Image: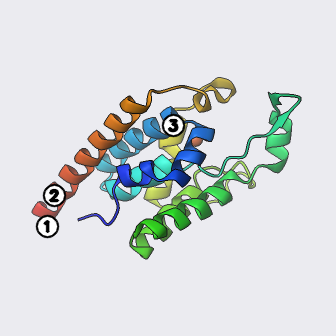
Amino acid sequence: MRHVTLIQIFNHHIAKKYLSRSGIAHAIACAYNAFKLAKKSNVSVDLATKAALLHDMGHYTWYSNGKWDYDLYRKNDIHAIKGAERAHKLLIRLGENPIIAKDIALAILFHTDSYMPEGFIKRTPLQEIVKLADEMDEEQGGNHHYRKIEKEKAVKLIERLDEMVDEELENTTEQN
Ligand SMILES: [Fe+2]
């Protein structure tokens, strides 16, 4: 049994606020990517989907003169650090197991090296999955952050993913 489901996370007002900023469609696509990757590599689908769903919740909007300013973003961005902290706080509030919340926060912290020198991070399989899941959904010019999705569709997709995670967890406990 999971302590917290994806839909509980998704319906929380804090998640809503930050995920709308960085793109709900992108967050959901990444969570599905992470599910597939985690299943293939025997990594927890519970942790991978949660980390991928929340991986960009640390984004700040770097605008100057009404337009996204990539230069400002590259110089100042710490979205992985902020996201790790925000996701951890949210998960603990929702009653997540603290060990799981920590692993998810670390996977978010290391999902990008945009704020660190290249090759600095040595990732665990879970951390690698969240990075890959994100890259699989990236579009040129950061367009993945602006892709739209209808609210009802988003909720359906998250609920379906919750079922997939539960099925997968049941299958893996049966095998052990
Ligand atoms: Fe992302």
Residue 44: quadrant of the picture:
bottom left
The answer to which quarter of the image holds residue 46 is bottom left
Residue identified by numbered label 2? 170
- Secondary-structure class at tag 2: helix
* Mark 1: amino acid: Asn
Mark 2 touches mark 3? (CB < 8 Å) = no
Q: Which mark is residue 176?
A: 1
**Residue at 53% across, 46% down:** 16
Q: CA distance from mark 3 to mark 1?
A: 35 Å
Measured from the top left, where is residue 35 in percent x and y? 34, 45
Secondary structure type for disc 3: helix
Pinpoint residue 78: horizontal percent, then vertical percent.
73, 54
Ligand 1 falls in quadrant: top right
Label 2 or label 3, whichever comes before in sequence order: 3
Name the mark on residue 24.
Answer: 3
Find residue 67 and report its horizontal and vertical position in percent.
81, 27
Task: State if disc 2 and disc 1 touch (CB < 8 Å).
Answer: no
- CA neighbours of label 3 inside 10 A, class few (<14), some (14 to 19), many (20+): many
Q: Residue at x 85, y 41 (%)?
A: 72
Numbered-mark total: 3
Spatial CA distance of label 1 from label 2 is: 10 Å
Residue positioned 53% across, 41% down in the render: 134
Q: Is residue 33 above or below residue 12?
A: above
- In this rendering, the label closer to the viewer, 2 or 3: 3
Q: Dot 1: what SS?
A: loop
Residue kind at label 2, given as amino acid type = Glu
Q: Is residue 170 visible?
A: yes
The three-letter amino acid code for the residue at tag 3 is Ile
